[in-house]
């Protein structure tokens, strides 16, 4: 028992030494691998390159690993003979979207610039017209509640376009009005100041020029006469005729019927009694110029 | 392969968007070889690589107006090529993804040049292709983008939509695995050479 003890201790000591040497070797291998990986990742700083190559000189296995890795990378980077697919690609793309020759591309660029310039000119022109004759453009003169804009947007747009066209347009033919004469209620003429019948209140504040179709009815039911007027709508609801054809009303006319017509909609008709002779017309009254 | 700076490339792309055929041709010439090499390594088959390269370029040039100049053109091109390859694999399963070994034996291994050197290089390429085929799809793609295409880690990370650290991890593991596979192949080849000697 006593004689065996030193041998056991010796064996144990030898095992410990071998383990330490193996640990050191493992650590050296790990260090070498880390250096190799950093080198292959292109992340090894130049000052550590010397350390790598020193390690490789002293560690044969690490040098072999480095060699095989380097060979692997070289093989991956070896160029491949690639076929030239340019012609077939270009022809397929040309079939799908087409190629433009140089002069055509210039023309397209010029066309785009011209279109942009035309658009800017149109905007500028509208601005100038709006400044010179605000009634003839569809732009609002002041801020309006968004709810009004939403509710009256379509009608405003239609009326605006119609009005703008009316600047250049002549008076309409009365035949179109006569066809709608059925809407004229001759028995119950409305009062001249009842403007709500003619103009919905939401749009009554608009100071813009409106295109109205006015239909004058004479007293004699058997000889109705009709005429179309162009009128202004003032902010204070008064309506006045602008047409020179007012004479056609004749002295015998007691009331006229006015229709407001938006694009695509049936006209809203209202009838206005003429003011009695010598009496002042109330606000909202149809008056003759 | 024609190298060009990003600003030059951007100008060429703008001209190609406007319909300039010569500009589109420059783009193709600049990128087709690298894309073909990449697809060849990914698919292992020249016919598949050729199809994918052609389809990718056609798609990219047809929709060039959608290109976001903040990114690299090559990243966009390779992403589309990869998607096309994945779609083709799903469509033609199992013809495409049975890959890799049978398809490609190297461009210079034709019967007309049966030299020993050619044979050795052809074998090396086969071994490389086999080793690539043993990797996972991510490892294979990352190794090719990094070592074959020289993409930086950050660009690969964006392309693969994974963190830089994960890219590096895939790169190291893939490289180690390939080295072991190639060493095993090399050992087998040495034994065969000794037997023939």
Image: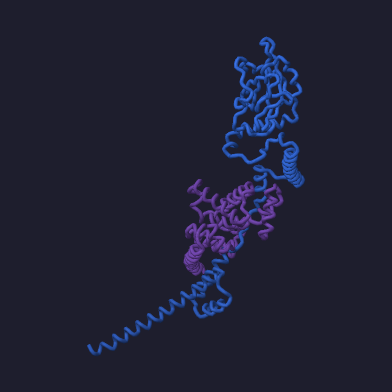
Chain colours: A blue, B purple
Nearest the viewer among A181 and B180 is: A181
Residue at (66, 43) in percent of width and height? A97
Q: Where is residue A106 in the image (x, y as percent from the top left)?
A: 76, 46
Above or below for B136 versus A91? below
Residue at x 70% of width, y 35% of height: A137
Q: Is residue B35 visible?
A: yes
In the displayed structure image, the side of residue B134 where residue A261 appears, left or right: right
Occupied quadrant, residue B118: bottom right
Q: Residue furthest top?
A: A222
Residue lying furthest front in this view? A278
The answer to whether A199 appears left or right of B23 in the picture is: left
**Relative to residue A276, is residue B157 drawn left or right?**
left
Q: Where is residue A283 in the image (x, y as percent from the top left)?
A: 65, 28
- In depth, the one of A52 and A261 nearer the eye is A261
Quarter of the figure that contains the N terminus of chain B: bottom right
Q: Nearer the viewer, residue B162 or A117?
A: A117
Picture coordinates of residue A262, whole percent (x, y): 64, 27
B177 lies above or below A107: below
Residue B111 seen: no
At a point 57% along the width and 55% down the height, the residue shown is: B39
Along the viewing direction, whichever of B26 and B176 lies nearer the viewer:
B26
Looking at the image, the residue that sits furthest to the left is A1
Quadrant of the rendered image containing residue A17? bottom left
**For residue A266, above or below residue B107:** above
Image x and y of residue A9, in percent:
30, 86
Q: How many marks?
A: 0
What residue lies at 59% left-to-right and 36% top-to-bottom? A148
């Amino acid at each position: 028992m006593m004689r065996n003890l030193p041998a056991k201790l010796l064996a144990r000591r030898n095992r410990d030494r071998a383990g330490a040497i193996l640990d050191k070797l493992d650590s050296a291998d790990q260090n070498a691998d880390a250096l190799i990986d950093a080198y292959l990742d292109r992340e090894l700083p130049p000052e550590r390159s010397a350390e790598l190559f020193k390690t490789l000189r002293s560690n044969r296995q690490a040098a072999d690993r480095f060699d095989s890795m380097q060979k692997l990378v070289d093989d991956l980077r070896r160029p491949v003979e690639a076929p030239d697919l340019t012609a077939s690609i270009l022809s397929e793309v040309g079939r799908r979207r087409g190629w433009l020759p140089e002069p055509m591309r210039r023309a397209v660029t010029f066309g785009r610039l011209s279109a942009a310039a035309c658009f800017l000119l149109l905007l500028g022109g509208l601005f100038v017209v709006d400044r010179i004759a605000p009634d003839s453009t569809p732009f609002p003169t002041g801020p309006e509640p968004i709810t009004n804009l939403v509710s009256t947007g379509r009608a405003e747009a239609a009326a605006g376009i119609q009005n703008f066209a009316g600047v250049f347009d002549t008076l309409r033919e009365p035949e179109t009005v006569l066809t709608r004469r059925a809407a004229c209620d001759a028995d119950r003429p409305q009062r001249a100041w009842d403007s709500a019948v003619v103009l919905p209140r939401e749009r009554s504040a608009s100071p813009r020029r409106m295109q109205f179709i006015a239909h004058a009815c004479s007293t004699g039911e058997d000889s109705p006469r009709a005429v179309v007027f162009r009128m202004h709508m003032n902010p204070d609801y008064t309506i006045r005729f602008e047409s020179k054809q007012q004479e056609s009303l004749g002295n015998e006319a007691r009331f006229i019927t006015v229709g407001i017509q938006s694009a695509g909609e049936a006209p809203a008709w209202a009838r206005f009694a003429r003011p009695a002779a010598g009496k002042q017309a109330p606000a909202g009254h149809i008056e003759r110029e | 392969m024609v190298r060009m700076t990003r600003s030059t490339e951007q100008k060429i792309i703008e001209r190609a968007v406007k319909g300039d055929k010569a500009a589109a041709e420059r783009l193709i010439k600049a990128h087709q070889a690298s894309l073909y090499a990449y697809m060849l390594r990914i698919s292992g088959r020249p016919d598949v690589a050729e199809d994918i390269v052609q389809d990718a370029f056609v798609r990219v040039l047809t929709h060039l107006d959608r290109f976001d100049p903040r990114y690299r053109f090559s990243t966009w091109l390779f992403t589309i090529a990869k998607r096309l390859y994945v779609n083709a694999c799903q469509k033609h399963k199992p013809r495409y993804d049975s890959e890799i070994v049978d398809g490609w034996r190297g461009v210079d291994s034709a019967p007309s040049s049966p030299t020993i050197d050619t044979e050795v290089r052809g074998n090396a390429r086969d071994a490389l292709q086999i080793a690539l085929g043993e990797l996972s799809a991510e490892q294979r793609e990352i190794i090719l983008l990094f070592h074959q295409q020289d993409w930086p880690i950050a660009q690969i990370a964006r392309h693969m939509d994974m963190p830089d650290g994960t890219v590096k991890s895939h790169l190291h593991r893939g490289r180690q695995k390939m080295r072991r596979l190639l060493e095993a192949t090399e050992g087998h080849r040495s034994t065969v050479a000794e037997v023939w000697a």
